[in-house]
Amino acid sequence: MASSCQADDESTSLNDSDVSNESDSTEPSDEEDNEEDDEEDDEEDDEEDNEEEVLPCKFYNKGNCRDGERCAYLHVCKYALKGNCRYGSKCRLNHTVSQGVSSSASSRALDRSSSSGVQRLTDGRYYQWQLNNGRGWKDVENDHILEAQYSLPHTKSIKIYNTSYGAVSIDFKRMKVLGKKLRVRRLDDGNTVWIWYCMLGRHWIKYGAKDSKGVSTPVKSSDIEEKFQRNPTSSFTFNINGETFEIKFKEMQQVSKNRKRKVTRRPLYRQPQAVAGVALATSGFQNLSLGTKPQWEFEGDSGKWHKFKHRKRTSTDCSVTSDDIESKYQQNNSGTMLFTVSGQSYKLDFGAMIQTNVRTNHTRRVRRVLV
C-alpha cells in the first residue's frame, strides 16, 4: 500500500505558490510540552496594543469596573475577541457587545450589528479569521482555508504567500503571526464543536474513536470538552483497565503513572455559509490565489504525497477516488469510511486524518488540500 492510498507531508502546500502548512505529527508522542501558558502570552499581547481601536476593559475582565455603563472600553471577554476563550459559552464574561456599552465605545467597536441591535463577535458567519497591522482588523479572504487547516489536529501552523504583507506565517497553537508586526484572531459564533485528540504513535487520535476491532475508548471528546468548559484550568480523569489517566488542560497533556502524551483541541470544521451583505476586506490578501477544489491525498513510504485514484490494472488499485472520499467527508467530517487496495481493507478516519490497514493495523497519514 506504499503507493496507492497514502497522504502528503508537513510542509505541503494548499497551493504550491501560495499556502503551506506545518504539522507536528512526526514529533515523538511522549515529548513533554514546555511552552508557557497561552493566556500569559495573551496578557503580554494586550499590553503591546497601541492601535487606535476600542479595547476590552481590563478591569471588567478582572471582575470589577467602577465606571460601569460609562466605561469607554468594551465590557467583553478579551479572549473571546481573540477567538480563543477557553470557557466558550460558559464564560462568565460577555461574548457580545450589547447596547449597554457607552456610545464612545460602541461607535468604534466591532461595527457589526444584528437586526436586534446586539453586536456580535461575527457578522453571522460560523467563524472569521482576521489580521491587524495596527490600523484595524481586516477579514481574511477565503478564511475557510485557514479554518480547514486549523481543524486538523496535526497542523500546527500555516504560511500564506503572495499577500500585500508578504509571506504570513500563522502559529495556530499560540494564535500569533510569526516574524511580522501583525496580529491574528479567530472570531467565533459561539456554536463551534470542539474535538479533543491525543498523540499516540506519532498520530493524533480522537478521544472516543473506535480501534480496528470496533472498540472505542471509555472517554469521549464531548465528555472532555464539557469538563473543560466548566473549568479550563482543571483536569479530566478517567480509567482504562485499572490504569488512571489525567488530562491536564493547562499543560495540554495526558498523564499516567509512567507516561506523558500531548493532547490538542481543535474545532470541527463547518463549511462556510453565505452571508448577505458581507464584503470581505482584501487589503491583506488582495493577490492571494487559492484553489477551491478539495483533493484527498495519502503519504507514501518516501514521505511524498499521492492523490487517491483507482489505478486500475496495477498492484495498487484503489477502490475509491479523491471525489469519493470528499463525498463521504461532506456527509460526516468526523466519521470513517472503508475502502480496499488490491483486495486489502482499509479504514479512513476523518477525525484523526489517518488510514489504517484493517488486517495489519498499519497506519498512514492522509490530508485534504485545496487545488
Image (tube, rainbow, N blue to C red):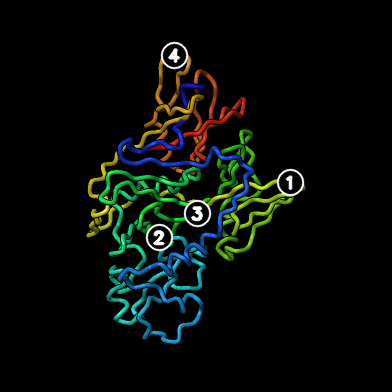
Q: Position of residue 184 (x, y in %)?
A: 38, 57
Q: Label 4 is placed on what type of residue?
A: Thr
Marks 4/1: CA distance? 46 Å
Q: Between label 4 and label 1, give the one nearer the viewer.
A: 1
Pick the front one: 231 or 62: 62
- Decide which of tag 3 and tag 1 comes sooner along the chain: 3
Q: Which mark is residue 258?
A: 1
- SS assignment at label 2: strand
Q: Looking at the image, which residue is at 27% across and 76% down? A: 107
- SS assignment at label 3: strand
- Decide which of tag 1 and tag 2 comes sooner along the chain: 2
Which residue is the site of mark 4? Answer: 314
Q: Between label 3 and label 1, give the one nearer the viewer.
A: 1
- SS assignment at label 4: loop
- At label 4, counting other C-alpha atoms closer than 10 Å, the crowd grade (few under 14, some 14-19, many 20 or more) is few
Marks 1/2: CA distance? 38 Å
The reply to whether discs 4 and 1 touch (Cβ–Cβ < 8 Å) is: no
- Decide which of tag 2 and tag 3 comes sooner along the chain: 2
In the figure, residue 363 lies in which quadrant? top right
Which residue is the site of mark 3? Answer: 194
Marks 3/1: CA distance? 28 Å
In the figure, residue 227 lies in which quadrant? bottom right
Which residue is the site of mark 2? Answer: 188
Q: Position of residue 259 (x, y in %)?
A: 70, 46
296 relative to 108 in the view: left or right = right
Question: Which quarter of the figure is the C terminus placed in?
Answer: top left
- Decide which of tag 4 and tag 2 comes sooner along the chain: 2
The reply to whether discs 1 and 2 touch (Cβ–Cβ < 8 Å) is: no
